[in-house]
Image (cartoon, rainbow, N blue to C red):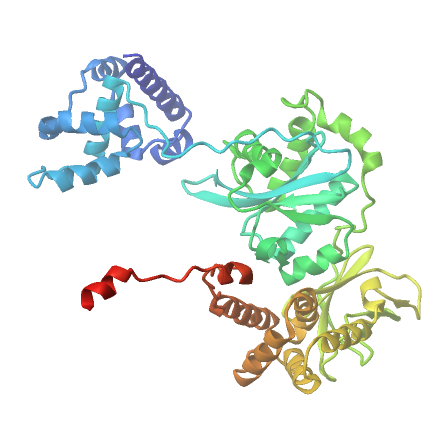
């Protein structure tokens, strides 16, 4: 009865809300999207006067007459299995009763809900809820959480516009930043959002926690997360450490999840879309006015005031994201893997130069330049040099990787049997998968020391014969031979033989015949 009363109150509130929005000039479609009900329901409510609506609300809602004969079956079914959905109940009815009337699934749903309400049968989960505890507050300057979101905004017309955004929140005291786009985010857009967030916070934390978004990572890889190429280069040149949540683990980044909802329902809801630039300007004003200026419900502190304290624990920012009006330019790559820009030389990763026609793209910022491939993959970030004749190096480019790879290669060859075949196999990995050569050598170094030489020899022959030039495959073949050998071993079972002592064996009384036997024969 209480549930029915609450349902009536909800409908009455909805009727008044529909009338109110209609008086403000919103059409049926806009009202439907605003309050979250079907357009036909909006039309029905608008056609009713207050008296007509009250009478309609007071009408008793009877069970569908077509399903009345199945009332007791459904009641017993729900009583025994309260976790069943209406769709499952419908399927059971079709399975058990071949003469079941042809009714809409919504009718079955209403039928099930009435029975649940009358008998107080609450729908239960089929599994135990996950148990977890509230995490302690992070240290000053330790962590930022970041996440993506999207929302359908109202426009001046009848249509709606989907916007995409990225939210950053300093975990200690919930200082927030949000960046909007009118199209889905790319890796480059995410990097721009990072730059803008760092500029807004004026500093950066030592860690940033993310969800597993495809514009940031390619594969979780059992904890060894594979980043997208552009984001990997960006992270390698920044001071923060990227950390990614496990799948189906939203509680790990609950702070930013709440921030995403806050952006949707405090800032975006009811706002008219007037372009990406205006939206970002309004968002900055909202952050200063509300999101970072009001007392936070959990910390009971004002984020912007606490941010002043936390700033001394944050890391300095390397990037100034303000872009100049200079267009994207193409430059030839020199043989020494540099480009000449404004009378200075900027280094590129070794191997960028692939011939006299190798080109890169350059994007000029106020205090830095970024170099991209012609396919728009980020190669390097350099501070802009205002002098002349200088060589600006990235610390990662200074390191002679070829020498370290050579030493690693020699170390692996020393661990493998048959130098000729081992050298051939390692060389083929280098030729077939040059970008993953270092990772392949490191993987082999990690595993082959614990594997027996005989299995390594057999695996080496097998991989060479079948052209399997992959370190993961090599290790798997070795383990296969090892497991096969272990299962094929036969344990000899020797029966227990009780061997007597020599003296005991001599202490034997021979069996004698009875003399009467011989007398009878005679």
Name the residue furthest bottom: 420
Instruction: Report the residue at 67% width, 21% height from top.
Output: 295
Is residue 278 visible to the viewer in this orientation of the structure?
A: no
Quarter of the image for the N terminus: give it: top left
Instruction: Out of 451 and 305, give the one closest to the viewer.
Output: 451
Horizontal side of residue 77 vs 302, given as left or right: left
**Percent position of residue 194, x then y:** 69, 48
**Percent position of residue 178, x then y:** 64, 40
Is residue 343 visible to the viewer in this orientation of the structure?
A: yes
- Where on the picture, by quarter, is residue 12? top left
Horizontal side of residue 209 vs 352, given as left or right: left
Instruction: Out of 447 and 231, give the one closest to the viewer.
Output: 447
Quarter of the image for the C terminus: give it: bottom left
**Percent position of residue 50, x then y:** 28, 14
Horizontal side of residue 371 vs 262, given as left or right: right
Instruction: Report the residue at 68% width, 27% height from top.
Output: 289
Instruction: Report the residue at 77% width, 33% height from top.
Output: 140
């Amino acid at each position: 009865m209480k549930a029915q009363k609450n349902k009536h109150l909800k409908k009455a509130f909805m009727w008044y809300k529909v009338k109110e929005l209609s008086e403000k000039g919103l059409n049926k479609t806009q009202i439907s999207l605003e309050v979250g009900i079907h357009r036909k329901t909006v039309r029905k409510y608008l056609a009713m006067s207050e008296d007509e609506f009250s009478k309609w609300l007071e009408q008793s809602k009877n069970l569908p007459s077509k399903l009345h004969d199945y009332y007791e079956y459904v009641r017993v079914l729900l009583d025994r299995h309260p976790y069943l959905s209406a769709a499952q109940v419908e399927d059971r009815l079709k399975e058990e009763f071949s003469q079941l009337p042809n009714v809409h699934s919504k009718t079955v749903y209403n039928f099930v809900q009435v029975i649940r309400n009358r008998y107080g049968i609450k729908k239960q989960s089929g599994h135990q809820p996950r148990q977890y505890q509230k995490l302690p507050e992070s240290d000053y300057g330790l962590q930022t959480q970041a996440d993506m979101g999207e929302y359908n905004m109202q426009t001046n017309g009848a249509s709606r516009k989907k916007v995409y955004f990225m939210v950053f929140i300093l975990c200690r005291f919930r200082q927030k930043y949000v960046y909007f786009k009118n199209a889905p985010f790319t890796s480059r857009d995410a990097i721009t959002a990072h730059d803008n967030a760092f500029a807004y916070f004026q500093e950066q934390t030592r860690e940033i926690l993310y969800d597993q978004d495809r514009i940031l990572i390619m594969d979780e890889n059992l904890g060894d997360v594979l980043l997208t190429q552009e984001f990997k280069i960006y992270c390698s040149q920044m001071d923060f450490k990227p950390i990614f949540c496990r799948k189906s683990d939203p509680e790990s980044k609950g702070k930013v999840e709440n921030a995403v909802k806050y952006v949707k329902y405090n800032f975006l809801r009811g706002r008219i879309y007037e372009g990406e630039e205006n939206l970002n300007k309004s968002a900055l004003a909202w952050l200063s006015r509300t999101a970072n200026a009001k007392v936070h419900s959990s910390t009971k502190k004002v984020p912007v005031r606490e941010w002043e304290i936390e700033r001394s624990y944050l890391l300095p920012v390397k990037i100034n994201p303000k872009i100049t009006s200079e267009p994207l330019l193409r430059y030839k790559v020199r043989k020494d893997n540099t480009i000449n820009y404004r009378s200075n030389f900027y280094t590129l990763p070794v191997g960028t130069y692939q011939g006299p026609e190798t080109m890169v793209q350059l994007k000029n910022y106020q205090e830095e330049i970024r170099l991209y491939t012609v396919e728009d993959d980020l190669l390097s970030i350099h501070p802009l040099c205002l002098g002349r004749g200088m060589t600006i190096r990235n610390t990662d480019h200074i390191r002679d990787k070829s020498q370290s790879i050579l030493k690693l290669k020699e170390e692996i060859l020393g661990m493998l049997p048959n130098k000729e075949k081992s050298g051939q196999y390692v060389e083929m990995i280098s030729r077939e998968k040059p970008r993953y050569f270092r990772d392949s050598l490191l993987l082999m170094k990690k595993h082959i020391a614990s594997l027996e030489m005989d299995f390594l020899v057999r695996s080496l022959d097998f991989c060479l014969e079948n052209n399997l030039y992959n370190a993961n495959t090599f290790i798997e073949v070795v383990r296969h031979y090892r497991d096969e050998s272990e299962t094929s071993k036969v344990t000899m079972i020797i029966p227990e033989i009780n061997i007597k002592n020599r003296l005991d064996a001599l202490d034997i009384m021979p069996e004698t015949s009875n003399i009467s036997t011989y007398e009878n024969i005679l």
